Image (cartoon, rainbow, N blue to C red):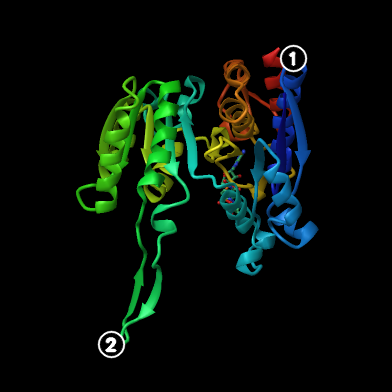
Amino acid sequence: MSKNILVLPGDGIGPEIIAEAVKVLDAIQQTSSLNLRLEYGVLGGSAYDAEGSPYPESTQSQAKGADAVLLGSVGGPQWDNLDRPLRPERGLLGIRKDMGLFANLRPAILYEELADASTLKPEVVAGLDILIVRELTGGIYFGQPRGIETLANGEKRGYNTMEYTESEIIRIGKVAFETAQKRGKKLCSVDKYNVLEVTEMWRNIMDELSKDYPDVELSHMLVDNAAMQLVLDPKQFDVIVTTNMFGDILSDQASMLTGSIGMLPSASMNESKQGLYEPSHGSAPDIAGKGIANPLATILSAAMMLRYSLDAADQAARIEAAVKAVLSAGLRTADIMQEGMSRVSTSEMGDAVVKAMK
Ligand code: NAD
């Protein structure tokens, strides 16, 4: 059966890194029974330039028909002064909302070969492999009421609302338990149940859900402790599940344990496992067009796409093993360059991964 993939190169280094991920998908196509149909579209600043909107209708209808979306990155200084609804980031928020992407999966993996890229001691982080499952469409970022008002005495008051319904917690919990089942079978749910009622309910629901997943060991941790433990002993974690705001902060913190933003993929999924896959980094306008960007985060995002949306975990593992082999062979783009290693360009790195897959 054929699978439809919408490819959105985006802005800045987006087109350069997407080109390398597409090389890898072409190689999969040629050497497996998978039938991948790639269609290209526009999103972000380049979409605004071409069609006057960061998320034009053409892209909206393409996204509806896709099994998965592979995105480069959006944004750049040339679009920073546009009205907010026209800015590139609105394109990203638009497609996430449209696709109903409520689960954000962000791995933080530190390959042994890159252990000294981290600011932490190599023995603390070498071999790190954790996954943060963040709720993406609820919580305090979306709760109502919200706003800034002026009180009768003239003082201003700003307020937001943290809220979750039972069903929102259950669906993110299920994604987290099922993901843990496919990995190390350990799940840590992060909350602030001692202060926030909404996360007391979160904790109770996770406990209830755990009865359906007896093979997964569930633990709970307060968010302030989780922030400390991530720096103190990050390898204690396998999968972490948490709310939108806590996940926003903890996933950035976890990604920095690895020291190399150019290596980190991410996935966002909806209930029917349709997903948007993109590197965790931005469009890096400072290095765009120079052929030096690291394409590995995007290539690893394509691997996540194969595993989570296209039922091709074997092909995902092939890509991940090829990335590891290329690093072991000493190939490095500028951002992860180390003494004694061979510096390669964006396209040379993509070619090397394709070669290692054969
Ligand atoms: P950034 O992630 O683009 O860049 C931060 C630093 O990391 C830069 O020095 C950059 O050169 C480097 N870097 C990033 N990716 C790299 C790669 N693959 N290889 C080598 N080096 C890499 O973050 P920023 O500078 O804060 O943002 C730049 C633009 O990207 C902004 O317009 C921002 O809004 C946008 N952005 C987009 C996304 C997204 O598309 N999801 C995410 C974050 C930022």
Relative to 57, residue 304 above or below: above
Q: Quick one: which residue is furthest to the bottom in this view?
A: 153
**Location of residue 343 in the rendering, given as x and y in whole percent from the top left corner:** 66, 27
Q: Residue at x 35, y 57 (%)?
A: 162
Give the structural element (helix, strand or loop) at label 2.
loop
Badge 2 amino acid: Asn
Q: Amino acid at mark 1?
A: Thr
Q: Earlier along the polypeptide chain: callout 1 or callout 2?
A: 1
Q: Residue furthest left?
A: 194
Within 8 Å: ligand 1 and the Cβ of disc 2?
no
Residue at 39% over, 20% down? 184
Checking the image for residue 303, the label placed there is none
Instruction: Locate residue 249, reporting x and y percent.
Output: 40, 47
**Mark 1 residue element:** helix
Neighbours of disc 2 within 10 Å: few (<14), some (14-19), many (20+): few
Q: Quadrant of residue 291?
A: top right
Residue sitting at x 39%, y 43% = 250
- Give the vertical position of 159 relative to 48 (above or below): below
User: What residue did someone put label 2 on?
Assistant: 153
Q: What is the residue that sits farthest to the top in this orientation? A: 358
Is residue 223 at all visible to an observer of this figure?
no
Image quarter (top left, top right, bottom left or bottom right) of the N terminus? top right
Residue 313: where, in percent of width, then height? 58, 20
| Up/down of 173 relative to 329, above or below | below
The answer to whether residue 338 of the structure is visible from this angle is yes
Q: Quadrant of the C terminus?
A: top right
Instruction: Write down the residue under mark 1.
Output: 31
